Amino acid sequence: MTGTTLFRVPFFHTPANPFRSADALRSHHDGAILVRDGVIVSSGDFDIVRRQSADVIGSVETVDWRDGYLLPGLIDTHVHYPQLRIIGGLGRTLLDWLEHVALPEEVRMADPDYAASTAARFVHSLASHGTTTALVFGAHFAHATASLFEAADRSGIRLVSGLVLSDRALRPELHQSPAEAYRDSTALIRRFHAQGRLTYALTPRFALSTTDAMLEVCQSLMREHPGIRLQTHINEQPDEVAACAQAFPWARDYLAIYERYSLSGPRAVLAHSVHTTDAELERMAATRTSVSHCPCSNAALGSGIFPMRRHLDAGVHVALGTDVGGGTGFGMLKEALQSYLLQRVSAAGQPLDPGQLLYLSTRAGAEALGLAADTGDLGVGKAADFVYLRPDADSPLAGALARAENMEQALAAIITLGAADAVREVRVAGDIVFRRP
Ligand code: GUN
Ligand code: ZN
């Protein structure tokens, strides 16, 4: 986006970590954000923004959104693109669901037309739910993963993704040799990494479906390309953890498998982490490894309740993910609500307030992906990545917002009731990536 625009709108954001600082949630009832060439140059109460920008404010385009609310663009840190069409496969546990629901669909991504149409729909689904940045599992096929990068590039969302790597335990059509994995990953990194809003993430599916030779390839690629990220799964279900222990008898725990190949650390996001031991948490914290917490998926697949308090007490960085299609949809606010609900009913649960839930859905993801200098909150210097919500006048959310006595209550209502139908417009660096007709 070029030029300067003033958005006058009530907004919320968490420029700091609300698990560490009491006033991290910033709410502006009569708020304003001044955007120049896609970057936020002033942000806060309208009166202050107006005073700070007196020289330009009379002449710039003004968007009056006082009938809705603005949030930072939502950040999904774990989602599978080839699983778009299999959301809702309820009643199975992880390994059974993989075999009977997920993997048969992932095989279909071998068809380039099917993959390209899935990629376009997938990216649209992210944007229409207010997600502006996502860490995405690509496909097991290089052409299908390229289709995802191309669709994201056309749309304008920020995408961190990569070719899914496996050389055992799935099914032959989804396996590649370590040499092929090296060749195809290298080509994709050269073609897409750091192009526009795209970032490459090395993506070994999970320890169970990779041999030592494949993990060694991952280690080499991470060394050769210092800017790329890494994503995989860890400690999702007890029988998966037991199978990994059998497959890697030398490993003292699940994390040790990845550690041996230098695959944990600040560039890594490990999804689920439901059955993680204290010893693993300590090492994750020490190496600044991030965890993607996927509460809808954890419930749908029966993985268990995420030990959020243990992660936070240990100092592990946690963000949120939808885990579509083990998860139940693209809504990151629904994910935040599910996290709140499950922590609330768990005996050892972590109480979560609206500011913490907003942080988990936005800035925490940017931090996990190394993108916090650009996105995750609405402070000065950040890209104008945001989602404008305005519910239909007769919706339950509109009613709850009309009754809200303060901004924190309004945010709680948005987290509880804010679904895709309330998303009116979504921007990345000021560019419109979704607008409801
Ligand atoms: N572990 C390995 N693959 C998957 C997957 O596709 N979804 C989930 N939830 N866990 C996995
Ligand atoms: Zn997953």
Image (cartoon, rainbow, N blue to C red):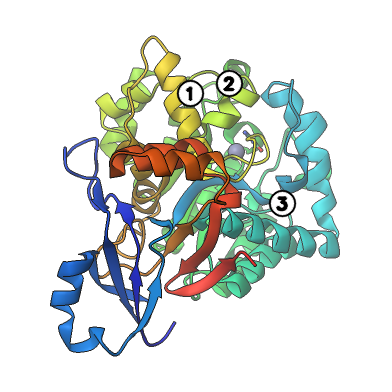
Quadrant of the rendering where the N terminus is positioned: bottom left
Name the quarter showing ligand 2: top right
Give the CA distance from mark 3 to mark 1: 25 Å
Whether residue 7 can be seen here: yes
Q: Earlier in the sequence, mark 2 or mark 3?
A: 3
Task: Report the residue at 29% width, 34% height from top.
Answer: 285
The amino acid pointed to by label 2 is Ser
Q: Is mark 1 within 8 Å of ligand 1?
A: no
Q: Which residue is mark 3?
A: 140
370 versus 314 height, above or below: below
In depth, the one of 234 and 332 nearer the eye is 332
Residue type of the residue flagged with mark 3: His
The answer to the question of whether label 2 and label 3 lie on touching residues, with beta carbons closer than 8 A, is: no
Residue 197 in picture, x, y percent from top left: 48, 70
What residue is rendered at 43% in x and 57% in y?
68
**Of the residues tagged 2 and 3, which is closer to the observer?**
2
Q: Residue at x 40, y 74 (%)?
A: 63
Q: Secondary structure at mark 2?
A: loop
Image coordinates of residue 118 in percent, x first then y, are 76, 57
What residue is disc 2 on?
A: 303
- The answer to whether the residues at label 1 and label 2 have Cβ atoms under 8 Å apart is yes
- Of marks 3 and 1, which one's residue comes earlier in the chain? 3
Q: Report the side of 107 relative to 151 (left or right).
A: right
Real-space Cα distance between discs 1 and 2? 7 Å
Figure check: 398 above or below 285: below
Q: Is mark 2 within 8 Å of ligand 1?
A: yes
Give x and y (percent) for residue 263. Answer: 44, 44
Q: Residue at x 31, y 33 (%)?
A: 316
Looking at the rendered structure, the secondary structure element under dot 3 is: loop
Tag 1 residue: 274
Q: Kindly report the distance in space between the C-alpha atoms of the residues bearing marks 2 and 3.
A: 24 Å
